[in-house]
Image (spheres, coloured by chain):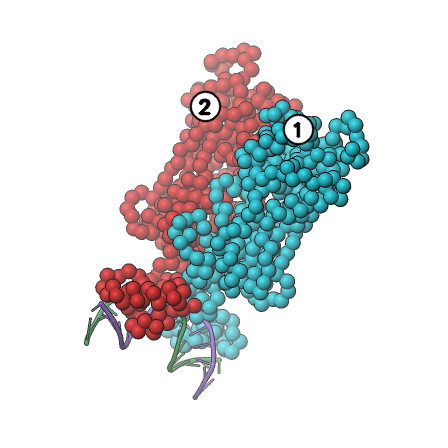
Chain colours: A cyan, B red, C purple, D green
Amino acid sequence: MATIKDIAKHAGVSVTTVSRALNGYSDVNEKTREKIKAVARELQYSPNLLARSLVMKKTKTIGLLVSGMRIEGSKDNFTYEVLCGINDCAGEKGYDLILFSTNSEQQQQKTYNQLCQERKVDGVILQGIKTDDPYLKEVVESDIPCVLVDIPIESDSVGYVTTNNKQGAKMAVDHLIELGHRQIGMINGHEQAFVSKQRLQGYQEALDQAKIDYQEQYVVNGSFLESEAEVQAEKLLHAHPEITAVFCASDLMALGAMKAARRMGKRIPDDLSVAGFDNIMLASYSSPTLTTIAQDRYQIGFESAILLIDMLEGKEGTHKKVLKTSLVKRESTKLKPTRSFSTKTT
Amino acid sequence: MATIKDIAKHAGVSVTTVSRALNGYSDVNEKTREKIKAVARELQYSPNLLARSLVMKKTKTIGLLVSGMRIEGSKDNFTYEVLCGINDCAGEKGYDLILFSTNSEQQQQKTYNQLCQERKVDGVILQGIKTDDPYLKEVVESDIPCVLVDIPIESDSVGYVTTNNKQGAKMAVDHLIELGHRQIGMINGHEQAFVSKQRLQGYQEALDQAKIDYQEQYVVNGSFLESEAEVQAEKLLHAHPEITAVFCASDLMALGAMKAARRMGKRIPDDLSVAGFDNIMLASYSSPTLTTIAQDRYQIGFESAILLIDMLEGKEGTHKKVLKTSLVKRESTKLKPTRSFSTKTT
DNA sequence: TTGAAAGCGCTAACAG
DNA sequence: CTGTTAGCGCTTTCAA
């Protein structure tokens, strides 16, 4: 509760000197500095960051706008792992994190700019917002530095970090194709996600490259939900029993698809190969274990924070970062049973 | 960026009046209030909470001190789910959350009190700290209101929220006993966790009640880690092949124990019944699925926030909350093969 | 019903 | 090297 004023009094100097001494300015006598430091310690002084921020117009605080801070997120842990990454990086660089929840009604009343301006955050990281979220428009127009997770928008004040979704999806589908599959379905997320568009592109590109015709009716949306994917997978597999492999835009949906397939009497991977995307925890615990595309969620968070802080501290350079993916082969994918194997579709 | 000063100028009143008008005080003419509100909207005014907090000595901010914000937490999601609960409750009540990570070195230099006083949080919720953490001592001595998760300490300024661990553990062991098991091992967490002590008590109480002698050598510590539990379980089962059931103080450790058992050629649940604690996501996805004690982590978080905010707003009452647990029966526990079943130990 | 003035704790010119 | 002064944006006595 001691203030620099108290210290000044006790040390017999002015507040200015105290401020300068404590902030490591060079233009202060070492003797007085020591004296002041001693008094500060004695009085258990700690600076009031509110006051400092008020005058400095910098809070050393990063706002975190997460729209998916829900208990269901527990299944894929996306939010949490990204948060860990952000937290670690911010911690290293001396920034604190303030959480803006967009769940609560209270805060939904407020605009993005209000949220940020009131708390005077230096910058913001946004995660889990959809492309049609009203906040997104505000972000782009606002000049508060911000980094978007998984939304490729770049400008002077906004950057982004994402995984190479297209490449990842392509790897997954390539893998299925290599295993001999040619009737490959896809369970995608939803229209309001950039990653869905990109993963679809990857799927199409892989087919294209293997000279397999793209069939629109082979692709359904599962909204990134296990339950919805289960429903959609069942429909898809019923309508197109010739499908021997499915690529799912998330592991959670892959789990749903496997459930559906099993209920329909299809064995995995013998009758149906299933590949996912994300490499979540459950992917290695499910049975069969899930072949999937790994993306490093922690690193997404970490890089986001790096990018933002670089922007805040005026470092030059591009404001984007695209991370690599890798294929994790497990039990859920298998060579297509080769009753009549041919390299070309008939 | 507009301030009340700007509004005052535009509206032709004093800053005092603006302040009072915007804050809903009654002693201001409705006409002028409307005028002021209009101007405020026009100028896109949003209050500077730093300035307000500085004079009001309230920040409407809760500090979150989590020592387990690590990627490994992904497996049990404890941290994340508690966070969700806190976040939701805080959001509802108009508080923002600020994350103090104790991972970073930077912040480990600072004492608990410094952390809180600098950022001027109104109160703190602490999670995941061990009983020998130096912060804990500070917390108790400090008079900043705070709520502890899973550490039963209560005073004027500190409260806690926890699960009824003893009762939960007893339920689990009771269940094993009902299934006919009498040689029941336990894989506990570690000495620096209150929950471990309590779960051990529950284990002992259940045995006691069933007139089974407590054997110290049947209990080992797995540090709440899957890998360590695996090691310890193997040792335990080797040393005491007569054991037919194991109660683990966490699901993660139960998974480790199952791994060890399987590697030793024991089938689960036929040769060995395993029960866990927590009811994490993986418990229902592992094979066999895991019998466990469910605790509601989201609610722990939510109640923590309620408790803290009540304290902050001066509500009277006890500062603790102990949540119920429930038994979730799944595949990993089974009747003991009754070669020579008897109700009493010989 | 309104305004002038003081002050929260800090930093930053500007003199000396 | 040190102190004086002003001011960040807000709330709050106290008078008018």
Residue at x 48% of width, y 43% of height? A70
Chain letter of disc 1?
A
Do marks 2 and 1 both belong to one polypeptide chain? no
Residue at x 59% of width, y 60% of height? A154
Tell me how far mark 2 sits from mark 1, CA to CA: 49 Å
Residue B10 numbered tag: none
Q: Locate residue B33 relative to residue A194 in the image: left or right.
A: left
In which image quadrant can residue B187 be found?
Answer: top right
Look at discs 2 and 1 and give the one toward the viewer. Answer: 1
User: Which residue is labeled 1 in the image?
Assistant: A241
User: Which residue is labeled 2 in the image?
Assistant: B174
Q: Locate residue B324 relative to residue B222 in the image: left or right.
A: left
Name the amino acid type tagged 2. Answer: Asp
Residue at x 53% of width, y 76% of height? A26
Residue A318: image location, x then y, percent: 64, 62
Chain letter of disc 2?
B
Is residue A37 visible in the rendered structure shown here? no
Q: Residues within 10 Å of mark 1 (few under 14, many from 20)?
A: few
What is the quadrant of the N terminus of chain B in the image? bottom left
Is residue A151 visible in the rendered structure shown here? yes
Residue A207: image location, x then y, percent: 72, 41
SS state under label 1:
loop
Is disc 2 in contact with disc 1, using a CB cutoff of under 8 Å?
A: no
Name the amino acid type tagged 1. Answer: Pro
In which image quadrant can residue A185 be found?
Answer: top right
SS state under label 2:
helix
Residue B212: image location, x then y, percent: 47, 21
